[in-house]
Image (cartoon, rainbow, N blue to C red):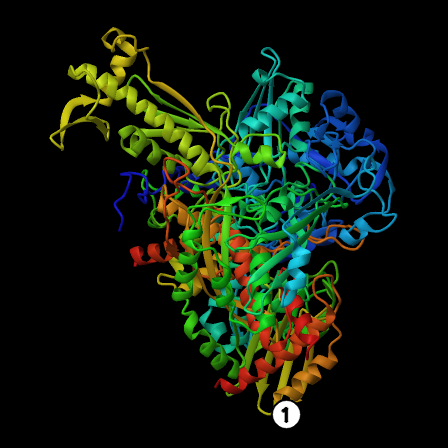
Amino acid sequence: MPKRRFHHIGAPLPRKEDARLLTGRGRYVDDIEVPGALHACFVRSAHPHARIKRVEAESAAASPGVVAIYTGKDLAQWTTPLRMAPPIEGLRPVEMTTLPVDKVRFHGDPVACVIAENRYLAEDAAERVEVDYEPLPAVADLAQALAEGAPRVDETLPSNLVSVQKFATGDVAARAREAHRVVECVFHQNRMTHLPIETRGCIAVWDEGREHLTLHIGNQVPHPLRSQVAARLRLSESQVTVVSPDVGGGFGQKIALYREELTVCAASRQLRRPVRWREDRMENLLAASHAREDRARTRAAVTKEGRLLGLELEILEDFGAYCFYPANYLARVVAMILTGPYKVRDYAFEVKVALTNKCGNGPMRAPMAITSWVIEGTIDAIARELGLDPLEVRRLNMVESHELPYTMPTGEVIADITPRETLEAVVHAIDYASFRERQSEARKEGRYLGLGLCSVVESTTYGSKFYKAAGIPGSGHEAAWVRIEPSGAVNVSVGLGATGQGYETAFAQVVADGLGVEPSQVRVQMGNTDVAPYGMGSRGARGGTAGGTAIFLAARDANEKVLAIAAQMLGFDSAEGLHLVDGRVEREILGERVKTDITLPQIARTAYLDPTALPAGMPPGLDFSRTYDPPPMTYSNAAHACEVALDPETGALEILRYVVAEDCGTVLNPQVVEGQQHGAIAMGLSGALLEHMRYDENAQNITGSLADYLIATSTELPRFELIDLSTPSRGNPVGTKGMAEGGVMGAIGAIAGAVNDALAPFGVVAERQPLSPDYLRALLRARE
Amino acid sequence: MKPAPFRYHRPQSLAQALTLLAEENDAKLIAGGQSLAPMMNMRLAQPAALIDLNDITGLDGIAEKDGSLEVGALVRHQSLADSARVKEVCPLLAEAARTIGHYAIRSRGTLGGSLAHADPAAQLPLVAATLDAEIQAAGPRGGRRVRAREFFVSLMTTVLEPDEIVVSARFAKAQPGERYAYLQFSRRSGDFAIVAVACVVRGKTLTLGLGGVEDKPVVLEGLAAAQKPETIARQARETVQPVETPRVPALLRKELVEVLVKRAIAKCTNSN
Amino acid sequence: MHEFELRVNGQRYSVRAEPRKLLSDVLREDCRLTGTHVGCEHGVCGACTVLVDGKPSRACLLYAVQMQGHEITTIEAVAKDGRLSPLQQALHEAHGLQCGFCTPGIVMTFEAYLKENARPTEAQVREALSGNLCRCTGYHNIVRAILKAADAQA
C-alpha cells in the first residue's frame, strides 16, 4: 500500500446527510411549506404536431378554485424566448417561446397553465380547457425526419437536420484500401429518460415590495439557472434567488430551465402570490426530458492480426422537438473520445442531429454513454470476423503506459490512465482463462453463457479550454469559499448542486485536510445562490475535481492565514514548521510534532475580535474565496467484465457476475465513490436491458406510466464486484480524476458484448438495445 | 395525477353495500384498490361514488368447506401466499399468489378485487379458471354461484351484473397424488405476466391454464398426461390466439406458451 | 368535504378533506409529515409506502378517508428517542442511500418485512425490495444493509 497523501481524504466516513434523510426529515422542494401558495397544472397536447387554432378556457376558468389560466400568448408578454445559437460550425440556431403560441411539437407539449387553490382543483379545471387543434403530419423517427419533403418540426429551419459536423485526420480511405479487411458495425441506442424518483417541481415566491423572486427548485446548477431565470423574466441577477434544497435525483434532468418552471415564476410575479408546481409522473415521462436514441455506424480498417489501421464513425441522433441544449453537444463528445484507450491515427467522423416530434433530449448521466459500446463492439466484431480472441485484439491495440500521454486522433490528450492494468485485473477476477471451457460445458445443458469485456476512458470535468475549443460558450471553472467564524466553526460553500453525491461529507473531508480540522467541524452550505459563490454546478462528473479542488485551494489559503496568526500568537517570526492538525496548532521540533496550546477557536477569535493582535498589515477576518479552472479534460478509466446466461427459448437474460476495476484518481470517500460506481453501472444495465421510451408510428408516446417505462429493480441487477486501482492524477493538487458516468458507459458495452458472445453459436449479433426478450427472440427465430 | 371527485360510502354490512350499489349511479366497489386507484389517479376511471367494502365482516376467511377451500373476497394476496392451510390444500393458489405484484401490493390487494377486475394477465383469475373455482356473488336478487370458466367474459369484463358483489370463491382441494406447477414469464419481478401457465396433473389427465395470452384465461382440459410434453406444448401454442400489442408481438406469446407449458409439465413430472 | 380523525404514529389528527384526497397528500399537507414521498402516484415506485395496521401499503393508492379506525405508521416514527432503528443504522453504515428520496419507502417496507421474516436470504430480500424503485444505488448496498439489519435483529 502506498503511503496515503491525506489524513481525512480517502476515509470511508459514513455520510453526514443520512441522519435527516433516513428519518423523513429531509427537505425536498415539495416538502417546503409556503403559506398561501397556489398550484399550477399544465394542459398538455395529445397531438404530436398540430397548429393551435384557439384555446377556450372560459368554462375552465369558472371551475372551483381557479385563479388564472395562462397560454403561450400571455407568457410571450412576460418572458423572453430561449435562443440557442452558439457560434458552432454546422449547428443551426433555434429559438423557442416559453409556452407554444402557434403550434405544438410533441405529445405532452404544454399549451396552457391552470393556477388554482390546490392541485386537485387545478387538474379538474385543466380537463375543461378546450384547445382547438389542426393536426399536422408528424415526424416519428429519424427515417421520417430525413425523408424528402418531411414535415418540418421547426419551420424556421430548412430541414429537420439541426446539426451536421464532420472531421477527418489522416487518410481513412487509404487505410481501408491497405487493410486486410474493413469491419462494419451498427449500434442502435434506445430512447430513455432520466427518471429521478423525485420528479421536477418548483415554488416561485415573488416579493412585490422588494421586487425579488425566490425560486425553490431541485436543480443541479443553481447559478446558471439563476442567470437564465433573471434574463428571461427581464430581471437583474440581484432580483432572483435560487434555492435548491435536498434533491431526489437529477441525472442530468435538473439542469436546464424548463418552460414549466419559467411559467410558474412568471405566474407568481403576475399574481403577486406564491405559485408551486409538482410535476406528476405522467408529465415526467412524457414531457420532462428524454435522452440518447442514436444510431452509430463504424468502419474499422484492420490487419489480419486485428490491428486497427483506420476508423470511421457516423452518428445520427434523434434530438426530439426542442433544443434545451446545443443539438450537437451530446453526440459530438462521443465522436471526440470514441477511440478511448486504443491507438489509431487515421480517423473520421460525421455527426448528424435531427429534430423529431418527440420530447426534447438532454444530457443523461453519461451523455456520451454509447461511446464504449461502439468502440468495444467494434473490437468484438473485429475478433469475430477474423476468428481472434477479443481479449488479444484489445491487448494488441491498447495504449501502453510508456506511450502516455497519448494524443487521440481528435487531439484529445489522455494521461495518467491505466487501461491495461484495469483490463488485466477484471480478466483475472472473472477467470477469463477458463471461461471458454465453462461456456462449452454449459451449452451441453442448453445454457448459453456469454462474457463481455468493456474498457472505458471517461471524459470528466470539462475545463474552459475544452468549451472554447468546442465552440460552446461557457466555463468549466468552479468556485468555493471557506469561512472560519469567530467561534472557530468552519463553513464552506461551493457552486455545485447536490443530488445525492454525499458532498456534505466528502467536501468536509477535503476541507479537513486542506485546513487541518476534523471533518465533523466542517459544515458544507450549498444550493442557495445568495450563499454559495457563482459556480457552474453539478454535471459531467465535475463535482469532485472542479468543486473539490476549488474547496481544497480555499482551505489551503485559510490554513496559511491561520498559521500566520498562530505564529504571531506564539511569538515566532514565521509560520514555518507550524501545522494545524484537527483544529490545534502543532510545531515541528527536530522532526517531531509537538502540540501547542493554540487552537483554531483562539485564532478565530483573534482574527475577528482582536485584530490589533494580528501580524502587522494583516486584514481582520477569516474569509477565503477561490475559483479553479481545471485542465481542458480530465480522464479516468475502468474495465468492466460481465458474464450472462441467455435462455434462447424465451430470450431471457440473467447476469451471473459483474466485475469492474476502476482508476478514478484520488478517492475523496471510498463509500461514496463505490456508491457512485454502483449507481452508474445500474443505470447502464437498466438502460441496456429494459428502458425504452417508445413512440408509435404516429409519434404518440406509448410509455406514459411506470408500467410501460421499465427500470431495473433489485431482482434484475447483480451484485457488483469492484476492484479499486486508483492512481492519483497529476492534473490537480488533490489528484482526483472525476467519475460516476463511466459506469454507465462500461455497463452498456459489457452487457452488449456478453450477450453477443452468448448469441455467437446461433450466428446472430444484437445491434440494438434494449436487449429485450422480444428482440433476442426475433434474432434467434430468424435462424431457427 | 389526482382523482376526480367522488362520493364515498363505507357500508358496515353486505346488505348495506348492496343497497348502496343499487342506489348509487355509476358507483365502483373498492377493496384493496391496487388496480382501481391507479386508474382513478390517471383519471382513466372517474366513478361518481366509491363503496368501500373493507369494513364488512365475514369476508376475509379462509376455510375448508364441503371438500373445497373457501376464500373470502377480502382475503389479501399476502395472506393467501402465507396461509399454511392454502399451501397444504390448494398449493397452486398459494404459489401463484406469492408472485402477485410486490409485497406492499400483496399486503393490500384482495381476491375478490382481482377476480372482479378480471385482468387477463392476473394470477388469481388464471388459477380460478384452471381449477374451475366457484365464484360466489351476492346481489339484490340473492346470491349465485358462477363457475370461474364462465365468470370471465373478456378484457376486464365478467358476468357480474353492476349490482352484484363477489363475496368468495371456492377452490377444489388438491387430491392425493395431484401435481401442479405455476410458471410465469414477465420482464421484471412483480410485473404482469407476458405469459403465465398453471398446470395440474390429476391421475391421467392434465389441465392447463394460460394467462396473459388472450383477453381472458384460456383453459385446456382433459389432456392426456401420458403424451409427450412437447406434443402438449405444441398443441397449446397452436390453440391460443394471442393479442398483438406494441410491446409484445403475438408470435412471442405463442413461443412463450410453448416453452412454459413444456417446462410446467416437466416440473409436474419431476415433482412428487 | 369530510371531517374525520386519523391516527398516525400514535397521534390523532383532525382532517377536513375531500374523500378523493390521497393518504399521501393528507399525510404531507394536513399532518405535515413530509417524510412520506410521492414518486409516481400509480403504485409502482414504492416511495410513499407507509404501514397501515402494521402492513406496508402504498399511500398513493389509499384515500385518507378510508383510514379512519386504522393505525398509520410513517417514517417519522421509526427512529425512537433520536436513535436510528437497526435497519436505518445499517442503511447509514452500508451507504444504502444516496439522494434519499426512495429511502423512507424502503425503510417502511422492511420494518414490516423483517418482523415477518427474521432471517431472509439475499434472494428473498431482493424479491421483497423489487417493489421499491431506486435510481441512485443499484440496490447493492441496500440489500447489504437489510441483510445486516436482519443479522443485527436476530
Report the amino acid beneath label 1.
Gln
The residue at the point 75 percent across, 27 percent down is: A70
Residue C147 higher or lower than B153, as above or below: above
* Quadrant in which residue A19 is drawn: top left
* Residue B82, visible in the rendered structure: yes
Between A420 and A370, the one lying in front of the other is A420
The N terminus of chain B is located in which quarter? top right
Residue A306: percent from left, percent from top: 55, 66
Classify 10 Å Cα crowding around label 1: few (below 14), some (14-19), many (20 and above). few
Taking the image as shown, residue B217 lies to the left or right of residue A529, namely right
Question: Element at badge 1?
Answer: loop
Residue A599: percent from left, percent from top: 21, 23
List the residue tagged with mark 1. B227
Taking the image as shown, residue A640 lies to the left or right of residue B147, namely left
Point out the residue furthest to the left here: A590
Residue A182: percent from left, percent from top: 65, 64
Between B14 and A330, the one lying in front of the other is A330
Total labels: the figure holds 1
* Quadrant in which residue A506 is drawn: top left
Point out the residue furthest to the top here: A612
Which chain contains the residue that carries disc 1? B
The residue at the point 38 percent across, 63 percent down is: C120
Taking the image as shown, residue A85 lies to the left or right of residue A493, namely right
Residue A290 higher or lower than A749, as above or below: above
Between A405 and A329, the one lying in front of the other is A405
Residue A445 higher or lower than B37, as above or below: below
* Residue C40, visible in the rendered structure: no
Residue A717: percent from left, percent from top: 49, 60
Between C125 and A588, the one lying in front of the other is A588
